[in-house]
Amino acid sequence: MNSKQFSTHLARAGFSVSLLSALISVSAVAQDDDSAPTQPPVMAPPVMEELLVTGGRLMSGAESLAVERQEAAVATDLLGADQISRIGDSTVALALTRVPGVTLVDGKFVFVRGLGERYSNTTLNGAMVPSPDLSRNVLPLDIIPTSIVDSLAIQKVPSADKPAAFGGGSVDIRTTSIPDDILFNIELGTGTNTASSDFLTYTGGEDDRWGSDDGARALSPQLSAALDQYRGDVSINNINTVARLDSIEDAAAINRQLAAGLNRDISPRETSGEPDIEAEINLGNNYYLPNDMEFGFLAGAAYDSSWRNREVVQRRFQDPENQVVTEDETVNSVDISGNLSFGLRLNAENSIETTSIWLRNTDDEVSVRDYFNANRLLSDGQGFRNTELRYEQRELEVHQVHGEHELGWDTLDALGLSDSLDFLRGLSFDWYISDSEASTDLPNEVNALSLTVTDPQTGEVQSSAFSGANNTAASYRYSDLRDYVDSNGFTITMPATLGNWEFALSGGMDYWQKSRTYEQYEFYLGSTTLGNSDPLFTQDLSSILADDNLLDPANGFQVTNNSGNANSYVAANKVNAAFGQLDMTWDYTWRLVIGSRWEDYQQVNLPWNPVNYDGSQFPGMESPDPQVVADYFQEVTYTEDDVYNSVALTWMTQDFWAEDFQLRASFGETTVRPDLREISGSSYFDPITDIVVNGNPDVVPSQIDNFDLRAEWFFSGGDNFTLSMFYKDIVNPIEQFEGAATDDNIRAEIHNGDSAELYGLEVEFLKSLGDMAAVLDPFFVQGNFTFMDQELVAGNNADAPTNPIRPLQGASDVVSNLILGYDSSDGMHSATLSYNSFSERLFFAGRNGAPDSFEQPFHSLDFTYSFYPSDNFTVKLKVKNLLDENLVIERTNTASDGSTQDVEIYNQERGQDLSLSVQYRF
């Protein structure tokens, strides 16, 4: 993507993103407080170390996190690197599905306890990070590989030291840190998918293997310059007007030359592809320096490449036999990551560490989509074909510095302040600074429309012809997203002891600021003179659009562009927060944590038309009336500040059916705010769902009361059992509702529902089987189940919903995880059979009597086997989706006689993934 071109257009707009922060500050009289999350001191009974026992590889990994989980101030679920590696999940999104009550939607967004991605908050080492998603503020977790993860912490209960903007859960991704000793490992692997054999491809760029476009697809310099020269409109008539040419034919010749700047070598062709490629290398060490100081580093890099086919069948529920879509799509994915960390340990009480992470995720998609609609039915023997190319390059770059400091014995002695500052002994100060950038480049999205002649019985295409007589028969879209987040914060904690009481008073501040630009250009190509039956259009696309044909005046090709450009925007938001928390423990039996968090939130979103040269590029700012402009800014700006309280009470005892037992009760207040684009009154296209979304300046934040009760049993052998009950009451839930649209399109609207509530039960366990029978000693079973009920009351804001009381979108009533593990007694073999499933969940709610659509249960069964021929080598075999399940969405059609029929409106073949890898480590 020509990023310089995009930044030039933004500068020309005369309104930089940095000014957005000033705008919302002026609108809201904002304050500039800084803050950070806190970590209360450990207050646990001295017998905690009994949980650390020697066992199997996964058992040991789970037990290493058991102490942290037991000592956490509020209910927290933890997933360690050993557990993730054993199961074989490659991304954080997949790994999180092993956590109780967590499901995955669209392969990248996590739903926690039935609440969608907007209700979850994600941090990286405690810091906010930007999102490369084109229309959402939330971070898609499929971009983060598990190779850089040390552990995942999922807090489902509010506390003052966590951001208030979550309802389902707060996910903290903790990256790998400095090793204690020299570390070197290299891993190589390969794999395939059973549903992937003959792939589609096209002529791309020379750097595609590295997930980067070399400019072959990018917006050409001549088209970019033409937007400036012809004031945002490259149509023939406008070229003639602006350039004051002698004839319209001269303008048409210039237009055809501009069209030649489009990437027209777009014909799909078959290829055998190649097997998956996986490579990873890590190197680190820790050096011991004089005066008990230590210095260490960790560097790593990973590369993954894969080819996958997706076969999709869609049906319109009113006429499922005649209005059908069949799509063959190939996705060539390239994932590259790099990480570099340095750490300096001054003594046991003071350390500073830096973390730098760079991620690239690129999907190169080719699809051929044959479909029939109400105008051309399958039974008529005539249909449509869309040939689509989409190259999406997402990147995330993060740089962090964080420190932990304590005025302990060593520090006070070293400073010579043991006597004068003894009353501050134990005071700790933790801080972080984070600077990060996310980007998404789509240097070329091409959609070419053809007309087909088909078998009226099977729909098989017998011939196709480019619909070139339509001057928008081929569309070219260029998109560029830049998202920046700066954040910093600190926590101060002061412990104290008084008799049987232990106290920790903590407080801190947190600040983050996000700025985002999204710029999109769209061009159309077609003929104004040739008919659809012209022999030229029966050739392949690359031949039809070749230079000789394109530049021939007789063929009448021309390029136009979307001068309205309603999808570009600039936005910013920021949070100032401060919190205080008191953590009290009495006699290692009762623990009370109370806290409050204040947050000042400000947000602005401005629709932007970068090709508007005859007025303001920001609609709403064109009026000469200052009051009109002021009203416009009032509409696109949102501010709020509030205080969120939380309390958690824990009863701790021993020998209550287990060596250690905890009963936790907690309550907390949280909020969920509108996304960046949702407060604007304009419409925008969501490229993930292919849905036009209407924003709503009247939408307000959701307020959530969270109640949680959890009982935890910890056994000396590492076994554990947890029972959790939860209830959430949501006022003004933010949801997407279906809006009025044409038959072939779906339109969504953002509204506040009246209310929503959900309650449920989570059961979690880890059990070694050796105490049942000696022969079962190598085996263990681990699992969790979530049972939930929920409903949404749509209210008067929704536009004629079919069901005014319905489930929450994406929520499943039952979620199951089950793992059966094996570790041989000689330590040379381990195997894991893991099962994950969710029950039926609402995909999209209908309106005006149209039925709701539901995603059907998906049962995922995966197998991982590891062989350890020596302490240094590991051979791993992974098989995913053993049951060969498909993704299915159904809608129930009710006939005039009252009979019903379940119509499968969407079916995507997933296939089975197989991979083999070898790792060397010392």
Image (tube, rainbow, N blue to C red):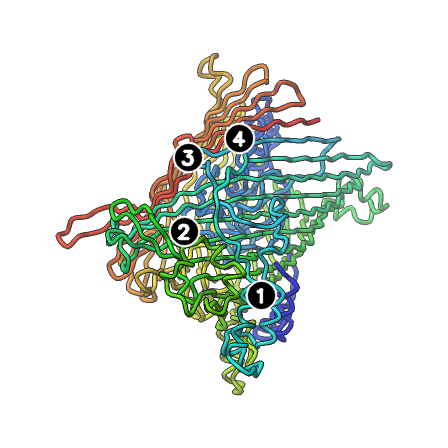
Residue on which the image places disc 2: 728
17 or 420: nearer the viewer: 17
Few, some or many residues within 10 Å of mark 2 (<14, 14–19, 20+)? many
265 or 722: nearer the viewer: 265
Q: Earlier in the sequence, mark 4 or mark 2?
A: 2
Q: Which mark is residue 915?
A: 4
Cα–Cα gap, marks 4 and 1: 42 Å
Residue on which the image places disc 1: 572
SS at circle 1:
strand
Foreground mark, 4 or 2, reads 4
Cα–Cα gap, marks 2 and 3: 29 Å
Residue on which the image places disc 3: 860
**Badge 1 amino acid:** Ala
Asked if residue 633 can be seen in this view, the reply is: no
Foreground mark, 2 or 3, reads 3
In the picture provided, is 915 more to the left or to the right than 790? right
Q: Residue at x 51, y 46 (%)?
A: 201
